[in-house]
Amino acid sequence: MAQEQQPGRRTVLGAAVLSAAGAAALGPATAARAEEARGRGRELPVPLVVAHRGTSGYRPEHTLGSYQLALDMGADVIEQDLVPTKDGHLVCRHENDITATTDVADHAEFAGRKTTKTVDGVELTGWFTEDFTLAELRTLRAKERIPKQRQHNTLYDGRWQVPSFEDVLKWAEREGRRRGRPVWLHIETKHPTYFRKLGLGLEKPLARLLRQYGRHKAHSPNFVQSFEPSSIEKLGELVDCPGVVLLSTAGSRPWDFVEAGDPRTVKDLITPEGLKWISRFAAGIGPTLDLVIPRKADGSLGEPSTLVRDAHAAGLVLHPYTMRNENSFLPANFRRGTDPNAYGDAFGAFKAYLETGIDGIFSDNPDTALLAAAEFREKG
Ligand code: G3P
Ligand code: CA
């Protein structure tokens, strides 16, 4: 049955992007997923705003303080990156190397845990979550990742712990009750193949927790995401939450493809055939913004690619990443002044990206993104 469109709000998945003719052209499984999605996304606006690692533009990332501020700002969805501990718990960190985002280096009792490892082909020296129990990690405090660029955020260094994913689920449950509506999460499995080889696979404990908290259904307020398509496929066998395949630069290769000897790169995945393949097991893609509007040689924005059109034709939504307000992260034509850490014309950049027809956007600055998205909907 067709769903009515609310003014200024479209469904998150499928309905915004699928015409009846388009749906008919898709395989039955994809069309069925899009159809199912029509009925479940009415709580969220399009384009939606995903608070990237919480409010990482204002608070140390992946802390309950960062997530709470995102919720208070009105972010539509709040992102968690997940890595495991030695005893199999999932914790919210962008990397398993916690050197830059915690005070672990100040803990003499953990000095001997400093080590060198190769993660997804990259050699790293530091302290790693898989060498700590959850109880040990709870003795650490989170700190700002880029203190030189975001000096204001260092005010909050040491205030919060590294949250476990279960802490976040409890927080979301509590806040959902308080607000009278669910807290949406966008949950990423980090380095899933690497951890599977260590006997610390991410998908099963994640699915177990989602089930335990009643978030495993197609209409539950979650997306699951990964740079490794096979992780989304595995999660699809365990839970019904919509999956989003993250796509890095065109020349890059998902690490599970490297390990499996699959020669395809992101360039292959963003062709109509590649997108059709993704649509067999995922509801969307999360491309880097440069795949949506490539930058010219001088760093300014060029012309939009055909990715939005092609992904929509395959029945996929797009949640690209990551918009940040500082000059150093913005396309050259939206920078203002010479201070790389000062804000540029972020609204101008948001407008350019939103006009491509994307369905959502990850941002370190959800408040700016929400204003930009609201303005876009009003004018659109
Ligand atoms: O998950 C979307 C975006 O966060 C991907 O980039 O490296 O920040 O996890 P990353
Ligand atoms: Ca992420």
Image (tube, helix red, strand yellow):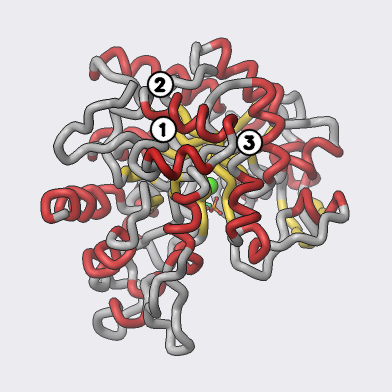
In the rendered view, would you say 335 is above or below 225?
below
* Classed neighbour count for the residue bearing mark 3: other residues with Cα under 10 Å, few (<14), some (14–19), many (≥20): many
The residue located at (45%, 54%) in the rendering is 320
Q: Residue at x 21, y 55 (%)?
A: 372
Residue type (three-letter) at the residue carrying disc 3: Phe
Is mark 2 in CB contact (under 8 Å) with mark 3? no
Q: Is residue 177 left or right of residue 63?
A: left
**Residue situated furthest bottom in the rendering:** 298
Q: Are marks 1 and 2 in contact (CB under 8 Å)?
A: yes
Question: Quick check: 262 left or right of 380?
Answer: right
Q: Which residue is mark 1?
A: 64
**Within 8 Å: ligand 2 and the Cβ of disc 1?**
no
Mark 1 is surrounded, within 10 Å at the Cα level, by few (under 14), some (14 to 19) or many (20 or more) other residues, namely: many
- Give the answer, above or below, for where 163 lies relative to 127: above
Q: Determine whether 380 is above or below 303 in the image.
A: above
Q: CA distance from mark 3 to mark 1?
A: 31 Å
Q: Which mark is residue 309?
A: none
Instruction: Report the quarter where the C terminus lies.
Output: bottom left
Element assignment for label 3: loop
Q: Earlier in the sequence, mark 2 or mark 3?
A: 2
Give the mark toward the camera: 3 or 1: 3
2 or 3: mark nearer the eye: 3
Could you tell me how many numbered marks the image carries?
Answer: 3
Is label 1 in a helix, a strand or a loop? helix
Residue under label 3: 281
The residue under label 2 is 171
Kind of residue at badge 1:
Leu
Tell me where residue 93 appears, x and y as whole percent.
57, 42
Quadrant location of the N terminus in the rendered image: top left
Q: Residue placed at 77% from the left, 49% from the top?
A: 256
Q: Amino acid at mark 2?
A: Trp
